[in-house]
Amino acid sequence: MTANIREHMDIIGADGVHVGTVDRVEGHRIKLTKKDSGEGSHEGHHHYISIGLVAEVEGDKVRLSANADVAVTFEEEGDGKPA
């Protein structure tokens, strides 16, 4: 399934809410674009979502098995080290 995930695909929660945009897949997680990084101390940092949350890849969308507000809690800030 991860082979079907491409750059610039929308990531949508199970509730239909936009979570972010794919930058690329790194190991077992999806790296979000910096524009989806949040605000304040999180601004300008990449965030990640576990591949384990992906329910399906459909067209140009990655659909998650969790609602958007829950998926966001699974995001991890990048530490600059490869995954």
Image (cartoon, grey):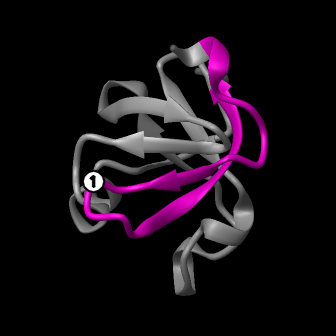
Question: How many neighbours does mark 1 have within 10 angstroms: few (below 14), some (14-19), or many (20 or more)?
Answer: some
Image location (x, y in percent) of residue 21: 65, 55
- Dividing the picture into quadrants, the one containing residue 56 is top left
Which residue occupies the extreme right position in the image?
7
Amino acid on which the number 1 mark rests in the picture: Ala
- Vertical arrangement, residue 73 with respect to residue 52, above or below: below
- The residue drawn where x is 62% and y is 41% is 31
Which residue occupies the extreme bottom position in the image?
40
Decide whether residue 10 is among the magenta residues.
yes
- Vertical arrangement, residue 30 with respect to residue 41, above or below: above
User: Where does label 1 land, which residue?
Assistant: 14
Q: What element carries label 1?
A: loop
- The residue drawn where x is 68% and y is 39% is 80
Answer left or right for 75 relative to 53: right
Image location (x, y in percent) of residue 13: 35, 56
- Dividing the picture into quadrants, the one containing residue 61 is top right
The C terminus, quarter of image? top right
- The residue drawn where x is 32% and y is 25% is 52
Number of callouts: 1
Which residues lie in the magenta part?
A: 3-25
Q: Which of 71 and 9 is in front in this view?
A: 9
- Vertical arrangement, residue 6 with respect to residue 77, above or below: above
Image location (x, y in percent) of residue 5: 64, 28
- The residue drawn where x is 31% and y is 63% is 68
Q: Nearer the viewer, residue 68 or 63?
A: 63
Image location (x, y in percent) of residue 34: 72, 62
Decide whether residue 17 is among the magenta residues.
yes
- Vertical arrangement, residue 15 with respect to residue 6, above or below: below
Which residue occupies the extreme front position in the image?
59
